[in-house]
Image (cartoon, rainbow, N blue to C red):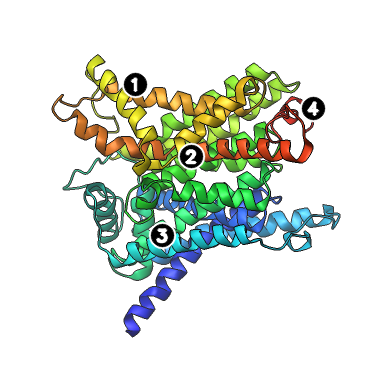
């Protein structure tokens, strides 16, 4: 009993280290964030910093140890935050808005209902994560297996095994980090990171919805709607897959760019978005193409809407590009220097039959209530009722991102080197996860639809702009 309690304490300390490091980074980069937004962003940023540092240690041929893994990045992040706070203090007017100073309305019945539903979900997935061993093939044979090998060898070491060695290693390394805190391999306790990561994703989604103009109750409602629609998101809250991490970073990267396009983001948001682009690229092999679609959608949106500061805004996209390179190049250099093949599965041709089989499969997955409930049909309705406003507001960015990725999914299946007899199994094993990466962005779009409905009820206007998206992007406000 005492040993189990000590293990739990060590695990909590390890998770706290991730949060403290990332919180410091988020607070220093974007002082305008609320504490909830800092914590939501900080959990993933802490994981990003720790795992990139572990990659650097392996590149320097230094063996993993807990002090060496945790102390340098934690000291650097904390010192940087304190330094930024000290520099900013003389210039502060003392009039910054703090959460404690805001006059918040009391929690309503609906607020407590949504919070209660999310709490029940959190309790369920936490128990499901820590009471069951590893399961699902990729969790056992790829991500979880790598984490054990890295821990036992004290380094990123692929000698003697093949488990998609070219895959990025954010998830295996963060599990290795927790093994270091525990002092042993414990597949039950380390899985607690996945419910917490899911909670951070939901908190980040809620914060973005609030910045888009939703009141607390509808923002909680949309967040709960996303979390409880279908089993796909819930399943990934308690299995050792990298898709939850990629979904988290995809929401951070896409959502922050969208807030920036609508001028709903606080200052210095794009440098923070750059770190989410890095995490997106470092979490899964599919992250780099997904990051590319975000940049492409943002560039097309700016060129189409032509705000007065078009050139400056286009140049500002250099931040996300730098983040993409930060997440991609270190692993690429390490892999090349250690003789690890970094190519994808071989592409032998374009297979029209696979495209024609993937097209109806994608359509059925979007309306399958078991996978995502009514999330995607609701998203489609929002787009339909937005009508021509899509082409005059930054909602165009969300539509381009989703549509572009649907097309990318179909093209990926068309070139997949899979036999005709196995293709249906390949579809079944991957399609729900590819859609999961996009699902929180669909929830943002639903939030914009809720904002429009709420705006009509408040103002009684027949044709209001959706949320804060229409005028700000066309203004000269800096």
Residue annotated with mark 2: 250
* Image depth: mark 3 or mark 1 in front: 1
Q: Is residue 3 left or right of residue 229?
A: left
Residue plotted at (68% across, 33% down): 262
Residue annotated with mark 3: 193
Q: Is residue 145 left or right of residue 278?
A: left
Q: Secondary structure at mark 2?
A: helix
Residue annotated with mark 4: 476
Within 10 angstroms of label 4, few (less than 14), some, or many (20 or more) residues?
Answer: few
Image spot of residue 248 (x, y percent): 47, 46
The answer to whether the residue labelled 4 contacts the one labelled 2, judged by CB atoms less than 8 Å apart, is no
The answer to whether the residue labelled 3 contacts the one labelled 1, judged by CB atoms less than 8 Å apart, is no
In the rendered image, the vertical position of residue 246 relative to residue 38, given as above or below: above
Alpha carbon of mark 4 to alpha carbon of mark 2: how far? 28 Å
Q: Secondary structure at mark 3?
A: helix
Within 10 angstroms of label 2, few (less than 14), some, or many (20 or more) residues?
Answer: many
Q: Secondary structure at mark 4?
A: loop
Alpha carbon of mark 3 to alpha carbon of mark 4: how far? 43 Å
Residue plotted at (76% across, 54% down): 87
């Amino acid at each position: 009993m005492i040993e189990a309690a000590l293990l739990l304490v060590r695990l909590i300390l390890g998770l706290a280290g991730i949060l403290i490091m990332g919180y410091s980074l988020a607070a220093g980069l974007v002082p305008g964030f609320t504490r909830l937004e800092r914590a939501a962003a900080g959990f993933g940023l802490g994981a990003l910093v720790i795992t990139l540092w572990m990659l650097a240690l392996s590149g320097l041929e230094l063996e993993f140890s807990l002090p060496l893994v945790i102390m340098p990045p934690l000291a650097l992040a904390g010192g940087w935050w304190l330094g930024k706070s000290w520099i900013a203090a003389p210039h502060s007017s003392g009039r910054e808005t703090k959460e404690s100073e805001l006059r918040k309305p009391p929690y309503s019945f609906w607020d407590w209902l949504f919070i209660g539903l999310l709490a029940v979900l959190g309790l369920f997935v936490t128990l499901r994560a820590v009471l069951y061993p590893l399961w699902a093939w990729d969790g056992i044979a790829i991500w979880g297996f790598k984490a054990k090998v890295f821990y036992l060898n004290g380094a990123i070491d692929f000698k003697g095994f093949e488990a998609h060695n070219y895959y990025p290693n954010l998830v295996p390394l963060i599990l290795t980090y927790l093994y270091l805190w525990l002092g042993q391999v414990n597949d039950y306790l380390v899985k607690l990171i996945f419910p917490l990561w899911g909670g951070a994703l939901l908190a980040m989604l809620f914060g973005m919805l609030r910045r888009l103009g939703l009141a607390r109750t509808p923002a909680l409602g949309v967040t709960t709607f996303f979390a409880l629609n279908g089993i796909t998101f819930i399943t990934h809250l308690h299995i050792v897959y990298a898709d939850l991490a990629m979904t988290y970073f995809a929401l951070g990267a896409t959502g922050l760019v969208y807030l920036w396009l609508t001028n709903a983001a606080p200052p210095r948001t794009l440098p923070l978005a750059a770190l989410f682009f890095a995490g997106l690229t470092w979490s899964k092999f599919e992250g780099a193409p997904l990051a590319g679609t975000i940049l492409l959608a943002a560039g097309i949106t700016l060129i189409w809407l032509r705000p007065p500061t078009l050139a400056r805004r286009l140049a500002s996209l250099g931040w996300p590009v730098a983040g993409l390179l930060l997440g991609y190049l270190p692993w690429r250099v390490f892999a090349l220097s250690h003789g690890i093949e970094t190519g994808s599965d071989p592409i032998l041709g374009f297979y029209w039959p696979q495209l024609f089989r993937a097209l109806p499969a994608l359509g059925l997955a979007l309306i399958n209530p078991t996978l995502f409930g009514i999330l995607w049909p609701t998203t489609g309705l929002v787009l339909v009722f937005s009508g021509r406003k899509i082409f005059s507001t930054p909602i165009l960015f969300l539509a381009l991102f989703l549509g572009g990725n649907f097309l990318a999914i179909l093209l990926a299946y068309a070139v997949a080197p899979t036999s005709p007899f196995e293709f249906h199994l390949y579809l079944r094993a991957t399609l729900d996860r590819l859609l999961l990466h996009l699902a929180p962005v669909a929830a943002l779009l639903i939030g914009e639809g809720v904002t429009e409905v709420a705006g009509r009820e408040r103002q009684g206007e027949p044709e209001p702009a959706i949320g804060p998206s229409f005028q700000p992007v066309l203004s000269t406000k800096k």
